[in-house]
Image (cartoon, coloured by chain):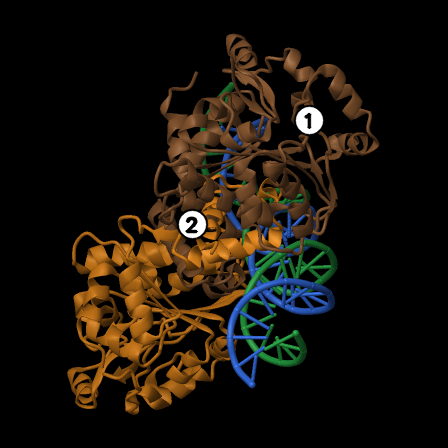
Chain colours: A brown, B orange, C blue, D green
DNA sequence: TACATATCTGAATATTTATTCAGATTGGAC
DNA sequence: GTCCAATCTGAATAAATATTCAGATATGTA
């Protein structure tokens, strides 16, 4: 009989709580109703639809795209950055800044950070990070060999050392090529004490920062010399490769294609990467969409940081 | 530089909290941000207008009228009941039910309840109260003499005894007329042991339930014989009286008019009423609007229970 | 009617959230 | 550059809120 009175009471309590900002205990005293009941009435207020909470995303944020990415690809987190034109250079700036902010606000004390080399996105990210936030990482581990053409070499090494400086962490470089000339040459390099020491840290990495590469190497990577001849690329393509992380190639489904090249790469393997608690992929751009989608399908990353154009493209194709 | 990233983060946190129903500690773990910061971000979300809370009053509730009454007349609480037609009988039913529900849900253990007699509203209220809620009042005190014409007598006494039964409280009746024939007659009655015992409880009353009367007596009151002749009524009118509570008359501003009649009434005085922590007035109807407004202006009640027609009329006239 | 089951309450308490605090950092003012 | 006030952070903790519990009461069922 008293449903309408109850609804009135719920409405009144909701107003006092949400609009007037009163504490439940104050409302309890004012209305002569126990605090427990006030709490229950407030819960009812939401169930009855008397109180509704609306979230208005600010311009330049894309919760729907992010939710779409998280759901479609089972991501822990997706960050979609605003971006004014669909050009590679513009996108790099956008996702670099976004990744920098993500890193700053979510790195915890004592983390062991793994960072790939030869990634323009990561380079932009590190540029965007402010010097010294209060969080101090334990160490920054380079997870892909960084030696190459001296003209672009500095990029690879600086990525690790600058990030280490910014986080007051110990840098652990991987003084070796990304791709050795042969499996035998790789074994020689891996025999080096510094290289071994760094590689021994791989399993301690708590957060890995990686780019995602298309099969066609980026300009930077091509310039570095850590690349493959057209025969090798054709071989990879023939075996279904569509992209790579840390020069480990995977197919349309994100599954490793393996092959002889794997024996020449000095860096984290895909299995080692999967063992890292938080893998953050930073990538965007028309050229890379196919590779990124594959990496997501293969669950190679937990967190994706990208731009709105790439996000739309990743979601445009119906779920497999 | 990072305002947009912060807004994105705030939006994300707000979604996880308000939409997905996650705890701050869970969000903290998911996003690698401390719980303290999550709490601060949620506060910012409201300040920034990203999260908005809307209250939709159900049909048949009148938060605006209630707020208007509370503000205009400095009431602790106002309850406006839905009512389908502006007729006295219909209104009585509406406010009686509403008052019954109010009483049931807000009476606490151990209260001393004062209740006036000769009020049709209170009669309806008591009829609406369900037998025995778990709250048990200590006692129910009749605060206005209830003896009169035997034909309607039962109403007055039953009001007290029924309410006492419903609340498992001890009834304390006031076995005297509401209006004695003379000041001397009143003194005789007040000398009675029972009468004194009950009147001694007046200052212990924690909640008083009262009707509000227009100058022109109601049918029930007129029938009871506890009333005045036209000469007395004219005298009251001449002195500005517009209504009464417990047969204590007040003017347009709610101030007591006093006079010889006061010496003949057996019941709580206005000063005694003002000393009661919670005075609940139950009244409505065209005929009484002027009296109710005056009682409110005089701060004679803390809580008003009325109907939507009366509420609108009380608010229609601009604030004094 | 009697019984079992589902609901309801307030007090006590567990859980969750907001704030205080101390330590750093930032951004001016000079 | 150097200093100072303002701001920011996470850990600890105070405060607020939700839930458990026990006791009663409604409600449905035989």
**Residue under the image location 68 percent in, 19 percent down:** A181
Q: For this rendering, which residue is in front, A164 or B157? A: A164
**Residue under the image location 38 percent in, 82 percent down:** B270
Q: For this rendering, which residue is in front, A219 or B237? A: A219
State the image coordinates of residue A48 (x, y, percent, origin top left). 38, 42
State the image coordinates of residue C27 (x, y, percent, origin top left). 52, 69
Q: Say which chain tag 2 marks.
A: B
Is the N terminus of chain A in the top left, top right, bottom left or bottom right quadrant?
Answer: top left
**Rendered view: B105 above or below B256:** above
Instruction: Tell me if mark 1 has few (under 14), some (14-19) or many (20+) residues whose alpha carbon lies within 10 angstroms of its own.
Output: many
Q: Say which chain tag 1 marks.
A: A
Give the image quarter of residue B3: bottom left
Residue denoted by label 2:
B130
**Residue under the image location 47 percent in, 57 percent down:** B44
Residue B25 as seen in the image, left or right of residue B144: right
Residue denoted by label 1:
A268
Residue B76 as seen in the image, left or right of residue A179: left
Instruction: Tell me if mark 2 has few (under 14), some (14-19) or many (20+) residues whose alpha carbon lies within 10 angstroms of its own.
Output: few
| Residue B285 seen | yes
Q: For this rendering, which residue is in front, A290 or B247? A: A290
In the structure shown, which secondary structural element does the residue marked by tag 2 occupy?
loop
């Amino acid at each position: 009989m008293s449903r309408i009175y109850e609804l009135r009471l719920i409405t009144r309590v909701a107003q006092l709580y949400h609009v007037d900002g009163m504490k439940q205990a104050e409302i309890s005293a004012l209305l002569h109703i126990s605090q427990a009941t006030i709490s229950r009435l407030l819960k009812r207020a939401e169930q009855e639809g008397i109180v509704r909470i609306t979230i208005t995303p600010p311009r330049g944020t894309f919760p729907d795209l992010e939710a779409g990415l998280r759901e479609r690809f089972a991501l822990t987190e997706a960050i979609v950055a605003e971006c004014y034109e669909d050009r590679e250079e513009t996108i790099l700036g956008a996702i670099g800044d976004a990744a920098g902010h993500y890193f700053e606000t979510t790195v915890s004390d004592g983390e062991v950070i793994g960072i790939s080399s030869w990634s323009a996105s990561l380079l932009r990210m590190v540029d965007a990070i402010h010097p010294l936030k209060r969080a101090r990482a334990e160490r920054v581990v380079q997870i892909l060999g960084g030696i190459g053409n001296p003209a672009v070499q500095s990029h690879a090494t600086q990525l690790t050392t600058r990030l280490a400086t910014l986080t007051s962490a110990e840098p652990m470089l991987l003084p070796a090529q990304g791709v050795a000339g042969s499996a035998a040459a790789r074994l020689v390099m891996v025999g080096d004490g510094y290289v071994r020491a760094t590689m021994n840290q791989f399993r301690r990495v708590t957060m890995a920062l990686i780019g995602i590469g298309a099969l066609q190497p980026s300009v930077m990577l091509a310039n570095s010399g850590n690349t493959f001849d057209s025969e090798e690329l054709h071989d990879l393509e023939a075996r279904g490769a569509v992209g790579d992380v840390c020069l480990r190639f995977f197919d349309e489904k994100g599954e490793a294609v393996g092959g002889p090249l794997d024996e020449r790469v000095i860096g984290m393997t895909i299995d080692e990467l999967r063992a890292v608690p938080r893998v953050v992929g930073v990538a965007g751009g028309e050229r890379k969409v196919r590779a990124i989608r594959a990496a997501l399908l293969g669950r190679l990353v937990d967190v994706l940081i990208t731009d709105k154009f790439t996000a739309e493209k990743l979601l445009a194709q119906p779920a497999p």
